[in-house]
Image: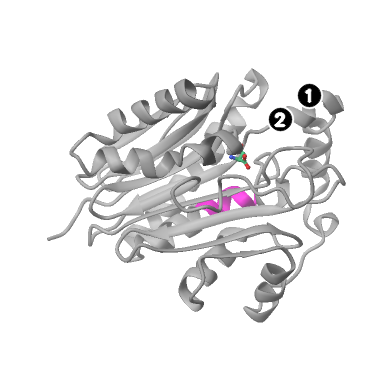
Amino acid sequence: MTAKRIIIVHGGAWNIPNSLIDLHKAAVAESASIGMKMLTNGGSSIDAVESAVRSMEDKVFFNAGKGAARNSEGELELDAMIMDGATLKAGGVAAVKNIFHPITLARRVMELTDHVLIVGDGARKFARKCGIVEQRIEDLLSRDEAKLYDELNSKPATVKKLFAGDTVGAVAIDVDGNITAGTSTGGLSGKLPGRVGDTPLPGCGAYADNQSGGVSATGWGEAITRVVLSKHACDLMVKGVSSQEACEAAVGMLAQKVKGWGGLIGIDAKGGLGVAYNTGRMARAFLTEEMNTPKPSV
Ligand code: ASP
């Protein structure tokens, strides 16, 4: 049986200011198009999610890859994971430095090792082993991007400390009905060195199971982790709840149980799409194979 190819992506749930709306809409639309191109060219949902997330990791205004938030010592420590709903294999990296595509490293963990999560220096060593070139942020930011980054990060320390947002993620279903979910982040701005959020933890920052669906989460990582948010939404989908209702129920549960905030995107096994968030805005875009252009919203 051939399934309908679908991709949905997000660029984080937070109070996106008016001045950044167009930028974020264009970037999530581009990411969805890149993922759909992969699917229509015969790529798997793993290829689609990886390529869609990579395109957002390249944008300096997202809190992922080269635009990632700094920790309290001014360093980038990145978290990412990807999960294959066909096999329930997952790969993640946490607190990894000096690479700009942690989603690709997470995929290598899933496909090339027997592990689920590799952190810190070990992840950096594994990246070297995989031939992933180490980067210096100064080498990668164009002058315009560097300026934008400085503007975005000129908030007072007290505001920065609490800031989370702009994390990126994607969920896709391919022609074989295989569902993949992935998420990538720099975590909370000003976080303690070594802090790991929800993003690289299966069931928290993302989850995928062909029998239920796939979900990518964003928001306050400590709260999301404590309620295992993505798995919660998938557990509802396996009972026949639609992706939209499952995402709404999961975000409601996050708020009610742990006063958490954030958002989810999802695709259920029937190809139904879901989006829910309890922040001011959430940048997202989806594309099905029947559509010509993606539909971005914030
Ligand atoms: N969930 C991420 C974290 O807490 C941040 C975010 O999604 O904006 O690390």
**Residue of label 2:** 163
| Residue 269 located within the stretch drawn in magenta | no
Q: Position of residue 137 (x, y in %)?
A: 81, 55
What amino acid is labelled 2 in the image?
Phe
Q: Quadrant of residue 223?
A: top right
Image: 209 above or below 104: above
Question: Within 8 Å of ligand 1, the CB of disc 2?
Answer: no
Spot occupied by residue 264 in the image (x, y as percentages of width and height): 44, 35
C-beta proximity under 8 Å, tags 2 and 1: yes
Q: Quadrant of residue 17?
A: top right
For residue 159, which numbered disc appears in the image?
1
Where does the magenta region start and end? 53-58
In this view, the residue in front, 273 or 31, is 273
- 52 sits left or right of 267 in the view: right
Q: Which residue shows up at 74% across the image and 52% down it?
A: 194
User: Which mark is drawn over residue 227?
Assistant: none
Q: How many marks?
A: 2
